[in-house]
Amino acid sequence: MARDFRTGSNGVGSEPSPRRRAAFLIHVLAVLIAAELLLVFASLDNAEFPALMGLLLEFSLVLSLPVAASFLYASDEPLAAFLGALTLAPLLRIVSLATPSAPFTTINWLAIVSVPLLLATAAVMHALRLRPRDVSLGPGDRGYASLNIGLIVAGLGIGLLEFQILRPQAWIEGASSPNLPFAIFVVFLTTGLAEELIFRGILLRTGVQLLGRRGALVYVSVLFAALHIGFMSVPSLLLAFIIGLVFGAVVLRTQTLWGAIGARGLANVALYLILPFAF
């Protein structure tokens, strides 16, 4: 059975401090944004020290959030659960920064790092006693199937819009590459399934128990956008925030991630595997 985070561990309703909750959530967001800004500064100046400090801040969150969650578990279980789930956000960023230029291609490295990332995600779900359907991996409300199909189709438009903003380099050597089917699979697995499971699945689920539907939707969307600071583009940052809101709202309404997974995967396939060779 999925855990109900609205009460303390002894099942008795508690009166947690809103000020303490706000302090923790603002702290996490501030540290994450500071880390991203340091990494941007490092890339602009080709400086090692800001990059090191940015990575250390990301690591500090990965190490401190589970510890804080363990101390808060008895007094404020919803906050403890959300902080534990938040560990996945800086972990995802660390994994993305660890991509080497050689000897692996970007796609090969994404395939490699997807394994520990998915294992970490599964570990968090196990720790929080979340079943797949608790994080919207089930079929959801079939009455909203058309909404999810529409979201998937919109993924192509999202990919085109992101390409106009970012103009990224392709992740494969050509649109006719024999590696294209494998690349598509990897993109859907990592940027589709893994990232949507983290943000619109685990974080949104635990966030709703702490902040309510609207509060969780906004906070998780801001967190998602913050991880796009590295693109150094205000339009990209705003688009990421809007995507977070729209995808999250659809998941909350339909109770399934598959529309968001399909849209995100399709958008990134277009962005990194197809459109760089079309323009």
Image: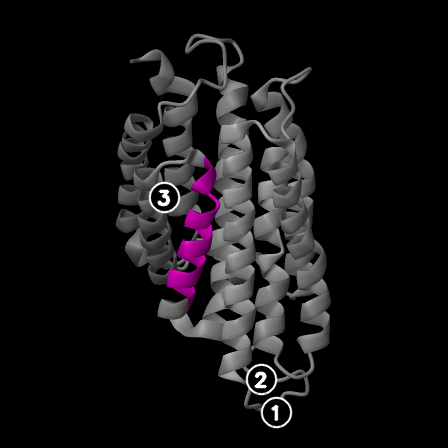
- How many marks the image carries: the answer is 3
Horizontal relation, residue 52 to residue 133: left or right: right
Report x, y in % for residue 37: 50, 44
For badge 3, the amino acid type reads Leu
Q: Main secondary structure of the magenta part?
A: helix
Q: Are marks 1 and 2 in contact (CB under 8 Å)?
A: yes
In the rendered image of this protein, does residue 223 appear above or below residue 228? below
Report x, y in % for residue 5: 57, 76
Q: Quadrant of the N terminus?
A: bottom right
For marks 2 and 3, give the one nearer the viewer: 3
Q: Which mark is residue 12?
A: 1
Horizontal relation, residue 19 to residue 105: left or right: left
- Residue 224 within the magenta-colored segment of the rendering: yes
- Which residue corresponds to the image point at 37% horizontal and 16% vertical from the top-left? 276
Q: Are marks 2 and 3 in contact (CB under 8 Å)?
A: no
Distance Cα–Cα, label 2 vs label 3: 36 Å
Residue under pointer 3:
237
Span shown in magenta: 216-230
Report x, y in % for residue 279: 29, 13
Dot 1 alpha-carbon crowd within 10 angstroms: few under 14, some 14 to 19, many 20 or more: few
- Which residue corresponds to the image point at 41% horizontal and 31% vertical from the top-left? 268
